[in-house]
Amino acid sequence: MKNVCGTSRIAGCQFTLFPMSNQFVEIILTALEEVDTSKVWKDTDDVSTCVRGRIVHIFDVTKAIFLHAAKTGEHVAMSGTFSIGCPGDTDADVYMDETEEPLNKELSASITQQAGCKFALYPLGREDYMDTIYQQIDLSKSRGVTVSGSHYATRLDGDVHAIFHTMQDAFQQAQEEVSHVTMTFTITANSPSNK
């Protein structure tokens, strides 16, 4: 049974990039400049960056920005929230490109990066929300990442491409069953804790 909360299929992600480096400004600005954001609406302020559009494009842009920051070799983290179907959302500030082809796919594919990520999926407005969450956790185990439990989140370890693919699949599938879905995440690469 589909639960209808919000009817807008505009997806978005509000995220903050944290380079742990003296060159943090350069890393952030370079990552934002190197990524093609022409298929999303984007706004960056002193707190975060917001991208809005189709699911495929917001994940493409978010992953590409993280990869371009992480390829510097500096310890980098990104934390954010994906959302779709919010009943309080508006149709303003959006670009809904008709094509499915992600613009950053080829350039991002050339960057290999290991990372750790914790994400939490929130299918809102349903009493059986845990069924949707458990289903996506189980499916994550077959997506080329190491999956482990964590308080209030699910941990994914592996290649950044596989991690973002896992999160995108979970988000995409959940929103097909539940109209209002949010997903929080924090991903980190090049952490000195892993050396």
Image (cartoon, rainbow, N blue to C red):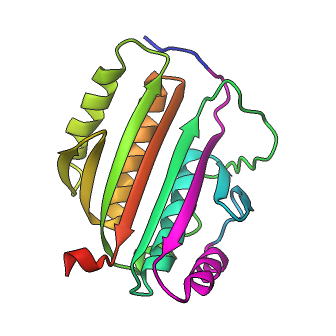
Name the foreground residue: 109 vs 194: 194
- Residue 97: percent from left, percent from top: 70, 51
Drawn side of residue 55 relative to residue 126, left or right:
right
The magenta segment is: 6-35
Q: Reply above or below: 20 against 52.
A: below
Drawn side of residue 43 relative to residue 184, left or right:
right
Name the foreground residue: 16 vs 103: 16
| Residue 191 is at least partly visible in this image | yes
Write the residue at 19% across / 50% down: 147
Magenta stretch contains residue 121:
no
Q: Reply above or below: 126 against 111.
A: above
Q: Please identify the quadrant where the C terminus is shown.
A: bottom left
- Residue 158: percent from left, percent from top: 24, 65
Q: Reply above or below: 128 against 193.
A: above
- Residue 129: percent from left, percent from top: 36, 20
| Residue 105 is at least partly visible in this image | no
Drawn side of residue 141 relative to residue 186, left or right:
left
Write the residue at 48% across / 85% down: 21
Q: Please identify the quadrant where the N terminus is shown.
A: top left
Q: Residue furthest right?
A: 92
Count of numbered circles on the image: 0
- Residue 81: percent from left, percent from top: 52, 46
Write the residue at 46% across / 41% down: 183
